[in-house]
Amino acid sequence: MSISLDEAVELTRTGDVWVFRGRSVPDRAIQLTTNSPVNHVGMAVVLDDMPPLMWHAELGRSLPDLWSGTHQRGVQLHDLRDAVCVWANRYGQRAWLRQLDPPADGEMERAVLRTIARLDGTPFPSTAQLAWRWVRGRVPAMPRLGRPALPRLGRPALPRLGRSAMPRPGRPAPRAGRETPASSAGERDRALETAYCAEVVAVTYEEMGLLPAGRRPNWYDPGRFWSGDDLGLAADARLGSEIEVRVPQR
């Protein structure tokens, strides 16, 4: 199923997830580094009579951040339509929309605004940091004195795949690994001194009450928000199947 960008912008609501997949060298590096079929994820923020917005993190600063009013790298709040066009036309990405059901309520929207106020402007990690954070998110912290050791957990590395072998909408992507709890609130705060796109969406979902507390933010990668994985959303919430979005060329 595919719809036009105009239709997608009209349909999208707060909490809906937008996922992107490209085939450039940096895109493939992120996909391989994070063992994910996609390389970027953002969340829609649609409030009152404001135009739909995109809450995400990226290296670029081509669009003004609508929270700070400046051009900045890292965690940003953009006009959603403009952001999708940049990712499709400038970065060569394909875009899909996954809708949150049931829609976010007023308390969830207030939680989103609190999270934006706290995280907007947080720097984006380097590629090396990104790889290390992904690994750390899947390996338990060293046991402290007097505490039993946790079992070693992990996810098998993704083999190098050609474009034709990449997962497609509707095809489950192989996922493995289990979450490990954050050792302390302080460690969680330090982990967000830099923030990756999936971490931003995950932390926002947690504040909305849609994800369980206690996971390290770096347990999440963009592929966790693809239908091939199961986020285990709370409150009987679910994300619908991917709807491909046709973006006009500029």
Image (cartoon, grey):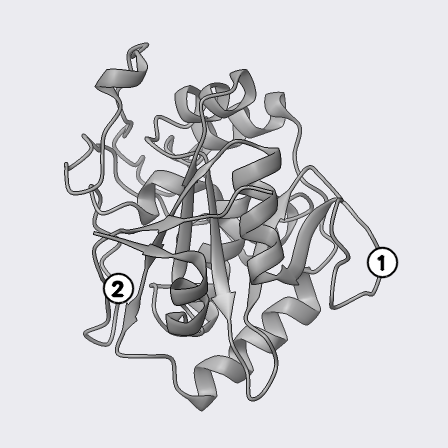
Which of marks 1 and 2 precedes in the sequence?
A: 1
Measured from the top left, where is residue 160 in percent x and y?
Answer: 32, 9
* Dot 1 crowding, Cα within 10 Å, few <14, some 14–19, many 20+: few
Query: SS at mark 1?
Result: loop
Question: Quick check: 227 left or right of 99?
Answer: left
Q: Amino acid at mark 2?
A: Leu
Question: Quick check: 94 left or right of 232?
Answer: right
Q: Which residue is mark 1?
A: 70
Q: Quadrant of the C terminus?
A: top right
On residue 233, the disc is 2
Measured from the top left, where is residue 206 in percent x and y?
Answer: 42, 65
In this view, 228 is above or below 82: above
**Where on the picture, by quarter, is residue 154?**
top left
Which residue: 45% across, 81% down? 108
Measured from the top left, where is residue 90 in percent x and y?
Answer: 62, 35
On residue 149, the disc is none
Which residue: 60% across, 69% down? 115
Tag nearer the camera, 2 or 1: 1
